Structure formats: C-alpha cells, structure tokens
Amino acid sequence: MKLHSLRARLIVIILVPLLIISLLAGAWQFRATTLRAQNIFDRGLLSAALAISRDVAISDGDALSPATRRLINDTSGGVLFYHVYAPDGVFVTGYSTPPVLPNSNLSEIAEPVFHDATYQGESVRVLQFQDVTTVSGVSGTFNITVWQSAKVRSSFVREVATRSFAVIALLVLSVALVVWYGVSRGLRPLLDLENAIARRSSTDLEPIKRPVPLEARGLVRTLNTLFDQVSRRISSKDEFISNAAHQLRNPVAGVLALAEAVQNAPNEVASRRRSAELIKAAREASALTNQLLSFERARASELTTENASVELRALVEDVAQTFCSQHHNARDVLTVGVPSTDIFVRADPVMLREAVLNILSNAILHGGPDLKNIWMQLSAEEMHAKLIVKDDGVGIPADKRTEAISRFGQIGNGPGSGLGLAIASKVISNLGGSLEVVPSTSGGLIELLIPRDK
C-alpha cells in the first residue's frame, strides 16, 4: 500500500522498526523471565528438600518443624508436596504416592535432579534428592522427592511478562505520540511553503526567498529555477510575438496591396505581372515567417537539455546537398571537406542542421556579385569539432561583426530577414560552443566550435 501522506510515511518509517524491536525485546524478556522463574522455583524446591531432610533426621520421621511446614505451604506462592523413602524402600513420611518419573533410578542419583512430570493429571516440577542420615536407628541414604504444580511458575511468568509488556507498550505509545508531534512540527515549514506557493498567481514568478529548512532548500532551488525558466520562456514568447508582428507588418501589407492590385488589374497582361509580384511577395513573407519560427526554436532550445548524439560529418554532407538543391548555382560554388573518421557531438540535429544551412545561405545571399567559391571544412580537435565556412565574397567588416550576428542585423540592404546568423549563433551557443566571424582580407570567414561527445 502506497502512503501519499509524507507525515504518514515518516511515522511508519520510524514506528515500524521501533515496533519490531519492541516485539523482539518482549520475546527476549519473556524467555529470560521463564528461565529466571524456573531457577527461582528450582531453588525453592531444593531449599524445601534440605529442610525436610533435616527435620526427618531430628524427629525420626515423625513430624516436620513449623518453620519447614510454613516453607512447604508458602514456597514461591504455592503448595509444595513431598515424599521420603528409607534406604530399604520403606515409606517414611509425606504423600504416599509421588509422581512417576521417566527412567528414574534412585541408586544413580548423586546430585539433585529436576524433572517435569504429571501428578494426578496436572503438570508438576519435581526434585529428586538423596541425603545420608539416621532415622530411628536406621542409617543410610534416604530418597526425598519434592514437587510443586507448574501452574505456580506459569502464573509467576505471566505476571512478570504482563508487567514488562505493559511497560513496553506504554513506551511505544509515548514514542508514537512524540514522533507524531515531532513530525507535525517538523513539516510545518513545508506546509507554510505550500501555502505561500498556493497564494501566488500565474503572473507572479518571482523567486521564493522565504527561509526554509536545509532539507527543503534543494526543492526551493529547483522551484526557483523552474520559475526562472518559465519566466524567460514567457518573455521569449512575448518578444517573439512583438518581433513577428513588427517584421510581418510590411510584408503582409505588401501582399495585401498586391492582391488588391491583381483584383483591380485593367487587363490580363497587368494581372499576370501583378500576380507574379504577389507570388514573390508571398514567398518572401513565408521565408520570413519560417526564419522567425527557427529563431524562436533556437531561443527555446536553451531551456531544454534534450540533445542526442549526432554524427557531424554525415550532417555536414546532408546540409551541403540540401543547400545545393535550394540554390541552382550552388554546386559550382560549394566545396566541402570532411575527415575520414566520424565526429560526434551532442545536439538537436534539426536545429544544428538549420544553423549550418543558414550560414551557407548567408554567404551566397550576401557575398556579392563577385562571389565564386564557398568552402566548408570540418575537422576534429581534442575537445571540439571545428567547422569553417569561408567565401571569396565581400566579407563582413571587422566593425560590423557584432551587428551581423544580432537579431535582424544586416550589413547593407541585401535580401534576407537578418535572422540567419542570429539563429546559427544561438543554436551553437546553446550547445556550449561558439560562432565567431573571423576578420579576413579576402571574403567572409565564419568559424564554429562545437564540444565533442566523448
């Protein structure tokens, strides 16, 4: 059975071992009491046997002294029975019929011997004892048998064990109450924390700063991290919506204006011309939308760590094929160099592919009319995979490098959304790597460093 209450779990975890220990202690106490009671009652039987032997010798077997009678009647809280045989087997005194003992050979008894037997249908404890004495002029070894009901001993054990179990039960109950009170007091800071969190609204994502026990600090730290991630995610969404609305306003307005122009075209030739312009504007708006979505995915990916092991050499070759299929003259421009061995990195393969593709697209879109070659070279260093994308175009001035990789940053008024390098930089940064625009005297040069997957 699963316990959904932390208080109940703690109480059970504490009290169940305590209860088991108490039961073991009770069992040990019962066994110890039983052995101790047997020892006490056996000593009582031996004392009575010695007293009877003395009185028989003194009175020639006629009578027992008052002190011995009191001992016999009151030994350990119960009546004691006895029987005395003379050396020749003649009955001397006591009860005429003693208990029948198993394998009893009186001639072989050298020390007092104790037995458990039955007397008149009742369990008894029996002592056989021999003593050399003289009674009525007859000298020799007299056999003395003393016995007592086993109920006396059982009653004594039961009384002592009951008191012991009562004390143990009282202690367990007291500990249970103390544990319940202590656990309730100990959980109060957590309940206060729960109430504080419950009073928050969906717009209140400030870190929890209230003091909490040491054991709960990890939980609070995790919650604060979660609040921070959610807050950043919400801010990212708000910023994305604002940027998307700002960037899409003009393209959408242009598409709408061209659509109205097509509708109001004076003739078929004008309608076709304006339709072509409308299709071009719609494609540009679609490309801008896709870039905005890619940038948002790149921003959101920094809040997660769900990356897989990616073989970078195959990914670079696949990106090159996609790039060539998107740009009709790319096959004559692009040169790809990869090592002969596999290079593994931990990354989101979709976003990493998007990043590399954006760098290539940026080179061909902004390389200028004199661009003739783009080189993409992959190599493996000790801790990083290194990817270089170089072109012989106009390049990026040193004072414009920061602007080139910023959001909506463009060097000049060329085509594109200004998000390509920003997306690539964010993706690589989320992987723990770096994207650097390297100054070059001949064209553009971008260097990527991505941590290798060991």
Image (tube, helix red, strand yellow):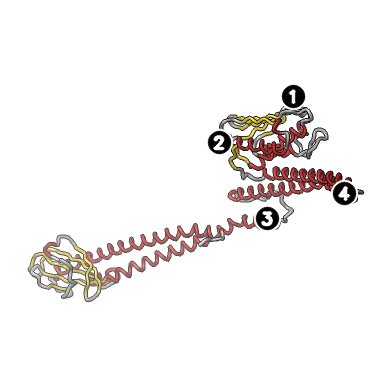
Label placed on residue 197: 3
Can you say whether 126 is above or below 383 in the image?
Answer: below
Name the element at disc 3.
Answer: helix
Mark closer to the chain start, 4 or 2: 4
Three-letter code, disc 2: Lys
In the rendered image, the quadrant that contains the C terminus is: top right
For label 3, the crowd category at 10 Å Cα-Cα, with few meaning under 14, some 14 to 19 and many 20 or more, is some
Q: Is residue 172 left or right of residue 208?
A: left
The nearer-to-camera label among 4 and 2 is: 4
Secondary element type, mark 4: helix
* Crowd class of label 2 (few under 14; some 14 to 19; many from 20; radius 10 Å): few
Q: Quadrant of residue 82?
A: bottom left
Which residue is depicted at the point 71% across and 37% down?
A: 358
Q: Position of residue 271 (x, y in %)?
A: 87, 47
Q: What residue is disc 2 on?
A: 454
> Which circle's residue, 4 or 1, is located before the other in the chain?
4
Residue 305: x, y in percent?
62, 44
User: What residue type is disc 4 on?
Assistant: Val
Amino acid at dot 3 = Ile
Which residue corresponds to mark 1? 442
Distance of mark 1 from mark 2, alpha carbons? 36 Å
Query: Looking at the rendered structure, which numbered label has been put on residue 262?
Result: 4
State which mark lies toward you, 2 or 3.
Answer: 2
